[in-house]
Image (cartoon, grey):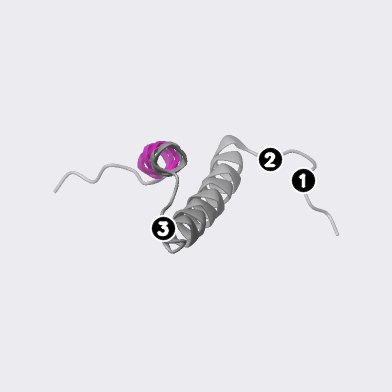
């Protein structure tokens, strides 16, 4: 197979985007599991939600880089 040995910038962004989406889903599952315990540790819950929001912000930023602006 003659695959290129180097990834271009867009390919690297797409890979990073998939990693961030996976981590975002994992955090969502962890938050849900923690909330189901009855009396979750509020500090841990807050930290996980803050981290999840950070991942979401990074996802949006990368999506904006990958999807060109279309002037209507």
Image location of residue 1, percent across then percent down: 86, 59
Which one is in front, 59 or 23? 23
Question: Closer to us: mark 3 or mark 2?
Answer: 3
Outermost residue toward the left in this view? 72
In the rendering, at what x and y percent does residue 20 appear?
52, 46
Q: Is residue 52 magenta?
A: yes
Per the image, the residue denoted by label 1 is 4
| Quarter of the view holding residue 63 | top left
User: Looking at the picture, how far across and down is residue 17, in whole percent?
Assistant: 52, 46
Tag 2–tag 1 contact (CB < 8 Å): yes
Label drawn at residue 7: 2
Q: Residue at x 80, y 42 (%)?
A: 5
C-alpha separation, residue under disc 1 versus residue under disc 3: 46 Å
Tags 3 and 2 in contact by the CB under 8 Å rule? no
Residue count near mark 2 (Cα–Cα under 10 Å), binned few <14, some 14–19, many ≥20: few
Which residue is painted at 35% across and 41% down in the image? Answer: 64
SS class, disc 2: loop
**Residue toward you, 16 or 7:** 16
Q: Which residues are magenta?
A: 50-65
Residue for badge 3: 35
Q: Earlier in the sequence, mark 1 or mark 3?
A: 1
Instruction: Sort mark 3 into few (<14), some (14-19) or many (20+) by Cα contacts within 10 Å.
Output: some
Crowd class of label 1 (few under 14; some 14 to 19; many from 20; radius 10 Å): few
Q: Nearer the viewer, residue 31 or 61?
A: 31
């Amino acid at each position: 197979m003659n695959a290129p040995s180097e990834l271009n910038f867009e390919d690297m962004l797409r890979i990073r985007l998939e990693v961030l989406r996976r981590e975002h889903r994992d955090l969502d599952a962890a938050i849900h599991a923690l909330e189901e315990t009855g009396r979750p540790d509020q500090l841990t819950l807050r930290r996980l939600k803050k981290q999840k929001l950070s991942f979401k912000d990074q996802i949006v930023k990368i999506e904006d880089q990958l999807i060109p602006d279309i002037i209507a």
